[in-house]
Image: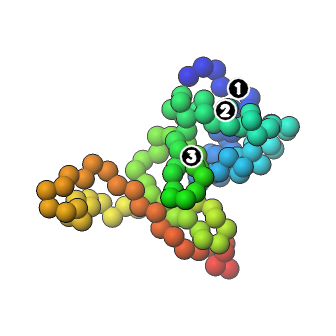
């Protein structure tokens, strides 16, 4: 990857501080504290470069805009809060799910998303 710009560094810092996958709009809002005046186009351009450079990973949830998290995290899953729409990392995994596949099928990977209310929304 080419040199990371000041805005790229602000984006990475915002995601690292959040400790969860963020929408582009959440990144824009969080990165503004380190890079005042950062714009939406700049955020999208830097996200694209950081994903292509292997520093960010894209989190896809059905029916949702993509979220972005720091790349190279160990295998994990996600929790989506139905009330605030935030997504959180779930670091536990039920393990080998091969037994759930139909006979003769080969499981290569899995993704699990839990849905409900986060601790802040439950209060």
Q: Where is residue 110, by image quadrant?
A: bottom left
Question: Which structural element holds mark 3?
Answer: strand
User: Looking at the rendered structure, which numbered label has been put on residue 19?
Assistant: none
- Residue found farthest to the left: 104
Name the image quarter holding the C terminus: bottom right
Q: Which circle, 2 or 3, is nearer the viewer?
A: 2
Discs 2, 3 touching: Cβ within 8 Å: no
Local crowd size for mark 2, using a 10 Å CA cut-off: few (<14), some (14–19), many (≥20) = many
How many neighbours does mark 3 have within 10 angstroms: few (below 14), some (14-19), or many (20 or more)? many
Q: Residue 46, labelled with which disc?
A: 2
Circle 1 crowding by C-alpha within 10 Å: few under 14, some 14–19, many from 20: few
Q: Residue at x 40, y 50 (%)?
A: 75
Mark 1 or 3, nearer chain start: 1
From the viewer's perspective, is residue 123 above or below residue 32? Answer: below
Q: Which residue is mark 1?
A: 5
Q: Residue at the far front: name it.
A: 63
Give residue 14's position: percent from left, percent from top.
69, 45
Determine the residue located farthest toward the top in the rendered image: 2
Query: Mark 1 or mark 2: which comes first in sequence?
Result: 1
Q: How is the image coloured?
A: rainbow
Write down the residue under mark 3.
69
Q: Residue at x 67, y 68 (%)?
A: 84
How far apart, in angstroms, are the residues tagged by discs 1 and 2?
8 Å
Which residue, as the protein is rendered here, is positioned at the far bottom?
A: 123
- Could you tell me if the residues under marks 1 and 2 are in contact, i.e. CB atoms within 8 Å? yes
Quote the CA–CA distance across marks 1 and 3.
18 Å
Secondary structure beneath label 1: loop
- Residue 89 visible in the current orientation: no
Residue depicted at x 85% and y 38%? 36
């Amino acid at each position: 990857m080419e040199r990371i710009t000041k805005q790229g560094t602000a984006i990475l810092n915002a995601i690292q501080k959040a400790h969860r996958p963020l929408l582009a709009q959440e990144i824009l809002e969080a990165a503004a504290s380190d890079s005042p005046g950062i714009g939406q186009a700049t955020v999208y351009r830097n996200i694209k470069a950081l994903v292509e450079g292997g520093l960010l990973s894209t989190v896809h949830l059905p029916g949702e805009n993509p979220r972005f998290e720091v790349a190279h995290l160990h295998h994990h899953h996600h929790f989506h809060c139905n009330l605030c729409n935030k997504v959180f990392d779930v670091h536990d995994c039920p393990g080998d799910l091969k037994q759930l596949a139909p006979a003769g099928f080969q499981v290569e990977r899995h993704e699990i998303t839990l849905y409900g209310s986060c601790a802040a929304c439950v209060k």
